[in-house]
Image: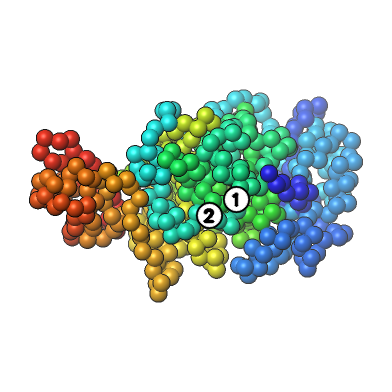
Amino acid sequence: MRFFPLALLLTGLAGVVAPEAAQAQSGTVRRHLVYFRDKAGTPFSTGQPQAFLSARAVQRRQRQGIAVLPRDLPVTPAYAAQVRATSGVTLLYTSRWFNAAVVACDSAALGRLQALPFVRAAATLNRGTNRTVPAGQYAQQTQPPVAARGAADYGEAYWQAQMIGAVSMHNAGYQGEGMQVAVFDAGFPGVDQMQAFEPLRQSGRLLSTFDFVDKDRTVFEKNSHGTLTLSTLAAEQTGHFIGTAPRASYHLCITEDVRSEHPIEEANWLIAAEYADSVGVDVISSSLGYTTFDAPSRDHRYADLDGRTTIASRAANLAARVGILVVNSAGNDGGNSWRYIGAPADADSVLTVGAVDSLLNLGGFSSVGPTADGRIKPNLAAMGVRAAGLAPNNSVVRGNGTSYACPILAGMATGFWQANPTLTAQQVLQWLQRSGTQAASPDNLQGYGVPNFVRAYNLVNPNTPLAAGGPRRPANELSVFPSPGGAELTLYLPEPLRRRALRVSIRDSRGALVRELPLAPVGGERVPLSLPGLRAGAYTCTVQAEGAAPQTVRFVQE
């Protein structure tokens, strides 16, 4: 595996939250965010970004017409040196964007830092007693590997890819080739051994790994939440599981410490985002969110979720401003008293993803908007109810959570950008919103709805539209095509049903019967299916022959 030099990390951070006086007890070492007054005396300049950004990072900005700004400059090296030389202080990271440093020290040493003339303020990041918190943000049910029963190639991942057009995207030749994705999570055990990730490893597309919690490169450990989210993106095991961007290149970043919940994790997110920027990442997929902490005094209030206040949200917006498409889960608080999205899902330039089931119904747990300043959130939705992923033993698991929906959609967004390379990151977000099932009437439950690659591609390229392509289901399975589709569809019949009289029943997402029609024996595979007057939404089509078990397939009506 090829690793990017970590020197790129030790660069510039600026006021993320309202600075506050640190109040750690003397002798107790905590982590703090120390803000600097300026970047005076820096040897770096915006005219020579190659000194602190990779060529790919510079090119990403140039393609999108984004200038290198003073906030991109690293922290003044002399300031970092004086922090490092201060007795009792360990310098962990510096941040370009916030013009600050993450340090570990007790309150006495922090006082010495605050006395330095270039230090503006400090905020404590992990005040309070540590405790173990539930691992991850998803509920899962483990099951053994199963034979593919969707598309022959996709296995259990078929429908979550199909419902957003990712299967058609792959058929059209867009699987993420040439794109780079950074995944922020809590750990990636098994990724270095699992069969589903062998193509990623063998092709050299696992570009870098870093643990921003423990400050080392070891990530194939800790919590398996990251393994699951990565699988929905990058897995490629034919007949078992294929993610939505299986040919992209990846950077794996641990930013989440499941042992406790403190704002230091938001600072980890910030530093990881700057790293992603520096190496030239195109897309960040983050199935993480922050609302409450072990120390209640640090909890975010709803008023804080305005996209401009929390550390993670400001970091996410800055990542978006340098041309990265930031995709973040909405959160799983929809069913409790909080209800709302967390940080950084509230950031205005972030593609925030809610969760729906296979019939496009909102998951009851999916966090909702609006933001504190009244903006629509989430932006879009993808499958996160009984969605499929892979456990570290390579077995399929199904579970609920926006942690599934986020990477599933991030992979499709990666392929969509690959197919339309002249777009900016924000244009990618906007076109995907225009392709959503609720584009005409967005709300604070699903935002603009469930997007679709083919629909979005054809909106961008009206003179050279992309055909949806044929279904990739085995010949012995029932399917409806295209999906999403219009009034005129095609029903694909498996061999046992082609020479028998049939009854076709169409039901809406609530189970109500909306259409029923008989079919005489056709002898062939394809049957025209005319369904005028159906409202946009998800439906099931059940086909039954006398004396045989019914077969059912889902489809989406535009």
Q: Nearer the viewer, residue 380 or 182?
A: 182
Instruction: Name the side, left or right, on which 225 lies relative to 49.
Output: left
Evaluate whether residue 367 shows in this view.
Answer: no
Q: CA distance from mark 1 to mark 2?
A: 8 Å
Does the residue at mark 1 contact the one at mark 2 (Cβ under 8 Å)? Answer: yes
Q: How far across and down, in percent of the image, does residue 317 sit?
A: 60, 55
Q: Residue at x 33, y 47 (%)?
A: 473
Quarter occupied by residue 144: top left
Left or right: 228 with respect to 362?
Answer: right
Q: Amino acid at mark 1?
A: Ser
Give the quarter of the figure containing the C terminus: bottom left
**Is 445 positioned to the left or the right of 522 in the image?**
right
Q: Residue at x 41, y 62 (%)?
A: 456
Classify 10 Å Cα crowding around label 2: few (below 14), some (14-19), many (20 and above).
many
Percent position (x, y) of residue 242?
A: 46, 44
- Asked if 543 appears above or below 38 in the picture, the reply is above
Q: Nearer the viewer, residue 491 or 293?
A: 491
Taking depth in this image into account, of 191 and 384 the one nearest to the observer is 191
State which tag comes first along the sequence, 1 or 2. 2
Residue denoted by label 2: 176
Q: Secondary structure at mark 1?
A: strand
Residue 112 visible, this angle: yes
Q: Which quadrant of the figure contains the N terminus?
A: top right
* Residue drawn at (36%, 64%) of the image: 467
SS label for mark 2: loop
Rendered image: mark on residue 249? 1
From the viewer's perspective, is 361 left or right of 182? left
**Which kind of residue does numbered mark 2 sit on?**
Gly
Horizontal and vertical percent position of residue 340: 46, 43
